[in-house]
Image (cartoon, grey):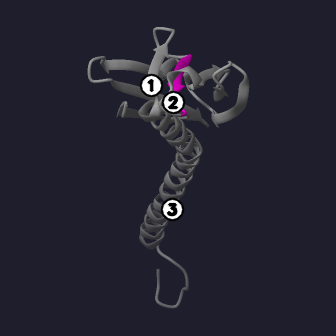
Amino acid sequence: MSKRQKGFTILELLVGSAIMALVVGAIATTLTILFLNYGQAAGQNSALPQVQNAGFWITRDVQASRNITATDPNGFPLSLKIPVDTDEDNDNRAEYFFDGSRLKRQLYDSSDNLISETLIADYMYTDNCTFATVNATLRYYQLTISASREGETVTRVYDMGQRL
């Protein structure tokens, strides 16, 4: 190209195109990663509080319970006798059971009258929720609980023992 003609040489166009391709590729990769991580975080942020709430309530009741009865091999429904006072004849009973993907807690008085029913957690992955006796003599138990939301599963393991 002579000095009087204006424009770009083919080499300048190729170098400019390569640089633009790198910049556009980097931006596209960054945006893809951001959107994928946002979806994963949204699912985990929905499931994690459910798992933590279930772990809190079951641990709290196990620590206060006098008697623990787990009926199925996976430990649910779980029945806990919770003392009201030193007299064993008037203990309350807390039952934990799954209603679909929801974990519920029913509290009964000593006459087996339902006092309250509470939704403890939602989005539970019931196939991976277990309550097991680790050491019956020491009254030591292990709870594994999972929740799944928007394709993301959160699992936590809680170790607990009775205080009485």
> Most prominent secondary structure in the magenta stretch?
strand
Which kind of residue does numbered mark 3 sit on?
Ile
Give neighbour class at mark 3: few <14, some 14-19, many 20+ (Cα, 10 Å): few
Pick whichever of labels 2 and 1 is earlier in the sequence.
1
Instruction: Give the spatial CA distance, label 3 vs label 2.
Output: 62 Å
Element marked by disc 2? loop
| Residue occupied by mark 2 | 83
| Quarter of the figure with residue 139 | top left
Which kind of residue does numbered mark 2 sit on?
Pro
Instruction: Give the spatial CA distance, label 1 vs label 3.
Output: 60 Å
Q: Left or right? Give the position of 149 relative to 21.
A: right
Specify whether residue 151 is in view.
no
Marks counted in the figure total 3
Question: How far across and how far down the image is residue 26, in percent?
Answer: 46, 60
| Residue occupied by mark 1 | 66
Which residues are the magenta region?
77-84
Above or below, 155 against 34 in this view is above
Above or below, 112 against 17 in this view is above
| Quarter of the figure with residue 138 | top left
Question: How far across and how far down the image is residue 33, in percent?
Answer: 49, 52
Q: Nearer the viewer, mark 1 or mark 3?
A: 1
Pick whichever of labels 3 and 2 is earlier in the sequence.
3
